[in-house]
Amino acid sequence: MTDVMSIDPRTGATVEVVAPETSTEQVDQLCRAALAAAPVLEAIGRAGRASLLRALADALQARRDDIVAVADRETALGSTRLNGELTRTCYQLELFGQVLDEGSYLEATIDHAGDTPMGPRPDLRRLLVPVGPVAVFGASNFPLAFSVPGGDTASALAAGCPVIVKAHGSHPATSQLTLEVMAAAAQAAGAPDGTLGIVHGQQAGADLVAHPAIRAVGFTGSVNGGRALLEIIERRPDPIPFYGELSSLNPVVVTPAAATERGEQIGRELVGSYTLGAGQFCTKPGLTFVPTGTDGDRVVDAMAEAIRGSSTQVLLNQGIAASYTRISDGLANAPGVKEIARGADAAASGFRAVPRLLATTGTELPAAVTEECFGPVSVVARYHAQDDLFAALHTLPSSLTATVLRGQQETQLPQAISRQLRGVAGRLVYDAYPTGVAVSWAQHHGGPWPSTNSQHTSVGSSAIRRFLRPVTWQGAPEEVLPEELTDGYRGIPRRIDGTLQLPH
Amino acid sequence: MTDVMSIDPRTGATVEVVAPETSTEQVDQLCRAALAAAPVLEAIGRAGRASLLRALADALQARRDDIVAVADRETALGSTRLNGELTRTCYQLELFGQVLDEGSYLEATIDHAGDTPMGPRPDLRRLLVPVGPVAVFGASNFPLAFSVPGGDTASALAAGCPVIVKAHGSHPATSQLTLEVMAAAAQAAGAPDGTLGIVHGQQAGADLVAHPAIRAVGFTGSVNGGRALLEIIERRPDPIPFYGELSSLNPVVVTPAAATERGEQIGRELVGSYTLGAGQFCTKPGLTFVPTGTDGDRVVDAMAEAIRGSSTQVLLNQGIAASYTRISDGLANAPGVKEIARGADAAASGFRAVPRLLATTGTELPAAVTEECFGPVSVVARYHAQDDLFAALHTLPSSLTATVLRGQQETQLPQAISRQLRGVAGRLVYDAYPTGVAVSWAQHHGGPWPSTNSQHTSVGSSAIRRFLRPVTWQGAPEEVLPEELTDGYRGIPRRIDGTLQLPH
């Protein structure tokens, strides 16, 4: 049986053996435990699960220093970032507690029996119910916020679904530690055994997705990884929902007015955004449109200067480091692309990457620059006239985000750019950078393929919907109805005979 | 080029040539026209699209007699049923007009900038926007309500998405006529060219699903048909959402108390439900659990008597007729199954089916009886003790519906059955039959695979969600925001800083 190793990306050395890879039999046991836990987790109700989520947040907070230390050793993301990520993770758990308290997410809908133009209608009452056990695939780049204690787990537990996480191989020790902290807190809070589980190893992940007890999959990773899991799902006798966040270019447009007003600042900030976390954000700005001319030159010069002042960054794992070198070299040498700056190569050991700034030189956008490259590299495309800009925007793939940096009070061009970019992005960012993704009710972190394959992802309150399905009760006696669908209930927003009513 | 024929299922004779099969080039032209129409259809706004839907309903009503006559000639469903179906179809268009007026479906959400435990949060505003052109695959069994003018089309147009329908080969003339009536009405109502299109032929359907302009697919049909389209979608460079309604067994449980109180009535009504529309309803009750003993015998005897008093019914097409004979014969001859009654075989010409009643005889449920068989056949399974019943329920696949027929005031057993059946059904029906599917806010017509592959289907107001995707605007100047996300707007329910607010 192969062991799962925790590796220090700063040195490339193995630090510890975390666990053996999870066997097919163990995956089966975990899935059976999750299936048995499902009705119990539903039965503790919204208030019970809100308490559970808060208890998980408290337990993670209480072990903050240990968790950050292990995560830093495994990911090299640094304690400032990882402390912030843990804060985000706990806030996310608490936000889903609010979502449960508020109750709109149940979409409680009652149509009383009555006559319609179609004839008599029976009494119909609709509510969302949990789908059952959920498999969550942790992401490499967020060992907390998109891994064991992340948005997939928080939203699935909130929905009432037990969770089994496939730990990412880049941070197995962090995954194991956070799982143990959360499982103990869940038990102490009265949640059933089987509420939370973890598996290690690629085969265990495949076994998990194929297991009949698993009713949905949340995944953050590569297009190829997502496609491979989708193939396993399509071979199931009962294909299940797969919610994947896959790949994103995140284009940025700098308008001429913005370049004139604050070209240098924009250049510095863009580099700050694309080298954040060593360029390993799904929202990293990968392609920036900058006007030609001296104002645009100031943007690019500031970017080049910032990159030349940078030095090697540590990537998450050997695979990402190897891909970074191969893909960024290929991109730099692609027809119509040149490198205009690179950071200092202070390479010693470990999984290291030299930050790079590339530029396209042709009038048409080379296809290579519209694909995501994970790591601290980004491409600048210069545009002469607005027509050139819009022709280029028209060729972009879909992204999680698209950003417009505009001049003070500038309206007309930003409007036209917004119209074009709305078709290829899930979030439109103005006068800021896409790498910050606030967790909130109005957040959306998704977009058409390849950025995601689904309407909802793991960020924001609507993430819970992925793990619920509607059920309608027709002519049901009151004693079989969920409380929220009984006539006398008043605790949550409900739609009654077509009219939305607030709790009272 | 192959011609598409309209065939009379009562005789099997070809009545007319409807159109040539649509060529790949023609599919491309239709898709380009739909793509061009998309921003215009969105720009006419919610009020404009509500008017459009009402104009479509009025136009269909105005041609009621012609439409029903053509549909009856092609489907043999009879003018009473088809008049009812047209009424339903028009009501459905009008319901989506109400959904647009009401505006909750946009999920307008505003989080103003502010401080959070995660740090400062930017202004975030979220709304659902149309996905773009939609392909709709008409169903064989509902030439109106699940075809050209059906729920998929109504909900996609409501969302702001142009629609291209793949006409079902069982009723191409009805499809062509209704499309022409609706396209003319759409044009008169000011909708852009390309709002509605139609294609004929299997290759045209495949071309449609593969076309880059198509952004989602609505499908009602067989598991095999759905799997074939999913394979085309998975080969796209950008896989798109596929919303399939596929197959459903629709189990029914008769409790001992119900059998005692009204066994004969239940038997007659069950046969009425499963032979309705020649058993070609996706909600046909395919398997009924009846207690052993004399009360249960009365249920089964009444079913057998009703079936023996029936005679051949006309099926929709040659393929369905051939499948019916093959599958129902196979089922009748499966181990543990026997035929207990059949209708009179008054076969002459045409696509005819003899109604049949089968029963399982073993203590365990044979696997064959848990698969859908389209047409007027159903299976009775007798249970001795409640344990036997629950063991059998535990083996059922997921269905669109599950039905409980209970005694007056009976509570305990219906509760236990409901708990078990909720896991394998989208709609729980009490003391009624599943074949009626009201269109309303609280309706749900779906369930886990194989009944559907998605959370939402074409029935009920939530059908619109399939053709929308979220977009969040971050720090956006007011002039780029949709009206519904501006601070001063008050016309629809919105969630503001976490609190749901009604229009005022």
Image (tube, coloured by chain):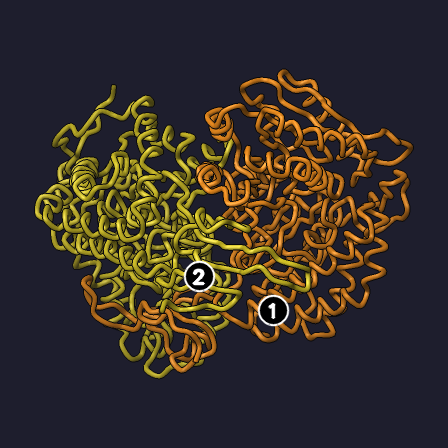
Chain colours: A yellow, B orange
A301 vs B302, left or right, is left
Q: Quadrant for residue B62, please give it.
A: bottom right
Q: Residue at x 27, y 76 (%)?
A: A262
Q: Residue, x 90% and y 40% (percent of image)? A: B13
Which chain is indicated by disc 2? Answer: B
Same chain for mark 2 and mark 1? The answer is yes
Q: In the image, residue A286 lies at what x, y percent?
A: 34, 57
Q: Is residue B404 left or right of residue A302?
A: right
Q: Residues within 10 Å of mark 2 (few under 14, many from 20)?
A: many
* In-front residue for pair A228/A284: A228
Residue B252 relative to residue A106: left or right: right
Query: Element type at marker 2?
Result: strand
Q: Is residue B343 above or below residue A351?
A: above
What amino acid is at disc 2? Pro
User: In the image shown, does A385 or A164 lie closer to the viewer?
Assistant: A164
Q: Which mark is residue B97?
A: 1
Q: Earlier in the sequence, mark 2 or mark 1?
A: 1
Is residue B96 placed above or below B403 in the rendered structure?
Answer: below
From the viewer's side, name the closer residue of A248 and B90.
B90
For disc 2, the marked residue is B470
Q: Position of residue A239 (x, y in %)?
A: 49, 36
Q: Residue at coordinates 43% horizontally, 48% vertically from top-left?
A: A479
Categorize mark 1 by other alpha carbons within 10 Å: few (<14), some (14-19), many (20+): many
